[in-house]
Image (cartoon, rainbow, N blue to C red):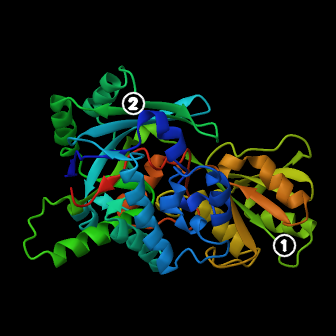
């Protein structure tokens, strides 16, 4: 069963929340972080992207950069820009995008649950990225940024969300990207006990977004346990920061593909090859065509939109990986026709999150940068959880979650 507990969060004062909080470290580069933090000494980028405090071009993995993160984290606390709560509690964090709101519960998740597979993964991680985040957790002795979890719907926890969010929030603001962020502190002891008890009834938690952060946080916690001769199992380092959402609240956005060339084929030859495995329908040069259902794809090629529907027998709906449209398109189009076999390393292909819209696919092809674009029907939360339950790993660049969790709303220290 999932083990979570409340914790003494480190948070910005209400009047500083928009200055302190930021986008996650991995959704922007150093130059973008430098620009967003310009003129704002309270920006969390000084802790999560501390290379911005060094001359441009400084390696973000330079040991001095990690040291600067600690220096800035301590300075933020000394100046009162981040303040630790007096007692442990949970929080509710709501995100609103396009008029739709999803509600998550902020928890301290259990390291042992991750190490023993009760926190389930659906993606591979890269050791270099894990080590970068492990260094950041180690030096700060804190989880500065949360992991994004999903869990099977639970009516008692839904009732907690309804009850808590009926009160006035601690924070309520709209970020520069246009997303709403609202945050409530759960300080009622009975409600805190309910949250802990109800999570104990949930067999598994699922990583929706943040596989590297999850791995790093858990591995550092495990390190600390092994280094402590008096380890008990209830120390704060046995837990890490997460926001857990009921699965029904979440919507996965499409993650699309653009390809530089047609592998020596003309557009007409390419369409002919596609017609062997797909029903191809020319949708013209007007409004972009969006995939309508599973196994239906949108192709933009030579100034025109096409609907591609995989023919029966070309996919396996009984296979949790084979049913995915990212698998169908990778096998039947990218591999068999275009000769792209490694999505992680092939320089001929790039990936575009659906948040950028189909217009971004059209732009990149019309500019001449890319030869074709392929839009996919998004994966469902059920598919993600089925794959995690089966012990399988999703193909690269399958899921895109939006909005991203806002960093700096709450931080979890490992020694308190």
Q: Residue drawn 37% across and 25% down? A: 165
* Camera-side residue of 357 and 228: 228
Q: Residue drawn 53% across and 39% down? A: 18
| Whether residue 350 can be seen here | yes
Query: How dense is the environment of label 1, judged by Cα within 10 Å: few (below 14), some, or many (20 and up)?
Result: some
SS for callout 1: loop
Name the residue at the front extreme: 79
Examine the image and state in which quarter residue 193 appears: top left
Residue 107 in the image: x percent, y percent?
29, 46
Number of on-image labels: 2
Is residue 319 placed above or below 124 in the rendered structure? above
| Whether residue 144 can be seen here | no
* Camera-side residue of 267 and 260: 260
SS for callout 2: loop
Query: How dense is the environment of label 2, judged by Cα within 10 Å: few (below 14), some, or many (20 and up)?
Result: some
Q: Of the residues under marks 2 and 1, which one precedes in the sequence?
A: 2
Q: Which residue is mark 1?
A: 262
* Of labels 2 and 1, the one closer to you: 2
* Camera-side residue of 321 and 86: 86
Residue 116 in the image: x percent, y percent?
23, 67
Q: Is residue 44 left or right of residue 295?
A: left
Examine the image and state in which quarter residue 267 appears: bottom right
Q: Residue drawn 32% across and 33% down? A: 185
The C terminus appears in which quarter of the rendering? bottom left
Q: Which residue is mark 2?
A: 170
Label 2 to label 1: alpha-carbon separation? 53 Å
Is residue 271 placed above or below 127 in the rendered structure? above
Q: Is residue 28 left or right of residue 143?
A: right
Q: Is residue 301 left or right of residue 199?
A: right
Res 31 label: none
Residue 67 in the image: x percent, y percent?
43, 72
């Amino acid at each position: 069963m999932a083990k979570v507990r409340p914790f003494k969060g480190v948070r910005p004062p209400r009047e500083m929340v928009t200055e302190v909080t930021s986008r996650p470290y991995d959704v922007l580069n150093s130059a973008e972080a430098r620009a967003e933090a310009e003129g704002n000494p309270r920006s969390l980028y000084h802790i999560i992207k501390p290379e911005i405090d060094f001359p441009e071009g400084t390696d973000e993995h330079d040991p001095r950069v990690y040291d600067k993160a600690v220096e800035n984290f301590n300075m933020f606390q000394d100046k009162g820009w981040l303040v630790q709560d007096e007692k442990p509690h949970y929080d509710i964090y709501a995100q609103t995008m396009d008029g739709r709101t999803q509600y998550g519960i902020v928890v301290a998740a259990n390291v042992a649950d991750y190490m023993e597979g009760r926190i389930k993964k659906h993606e591979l991680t890269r050791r270099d990225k894990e080590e970068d985040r492990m260094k950041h957790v180690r030096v700060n002795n804190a989880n500065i940024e949360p992991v994004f979890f999903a869990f099977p719907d639970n009516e008692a926890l839904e009732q907690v969300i309804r009850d808590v969010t009926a009160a006035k929030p601690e924070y309520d603001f709209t970020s520069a990207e246009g997303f709403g962020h609202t945050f409530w502190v759960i300080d009622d002891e009975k409600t805190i006990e309910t949250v802990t008890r109800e999570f104990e009834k949930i067999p598994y938690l699922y990583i929706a977004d943040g596989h590297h952060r999850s791995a790093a946080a858990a591995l550092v916690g495990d390190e600390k346990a092994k280094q402590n001769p008096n380890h008990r199992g209830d120390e704060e380092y046995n837990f890490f920061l997460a926001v857990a959402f009921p699965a029904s609240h979440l919507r996965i956005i499409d993650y699309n593909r653009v390809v530089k060339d047609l592998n020596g084929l003309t557009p007409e030859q390419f369409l002919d090859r596609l017609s062997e495995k797909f029903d191809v329908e020319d949708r013209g040069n007007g409004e972009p065509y969006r995939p309508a259902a599973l196994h239906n794809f949108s192709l933009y090629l030579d100034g025109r939109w096409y609907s591609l529907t995989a023919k029966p027998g070309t996919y396996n709906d009984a296979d949790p990986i084979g049913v995915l449209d990212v698998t169908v398109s990778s096998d039947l189009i990218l591999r068999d026709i275009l000769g792209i076999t490694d999505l992680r390393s092939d320089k001929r292909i790039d990936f575009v999150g659906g948040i950028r819209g189909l217009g971004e696919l059209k732009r990149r092809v019309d500019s001449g940068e890319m030869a074709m674009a392929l839009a996919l029907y998004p994966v469902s939360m059920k598919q993600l959880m089925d794959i995690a339950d089966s012990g399988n790993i999703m193909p690269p660049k399958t899921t895109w979650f939006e909005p991203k969790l806002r960093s700096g709303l709450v931080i979890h220290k490992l020694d308190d």
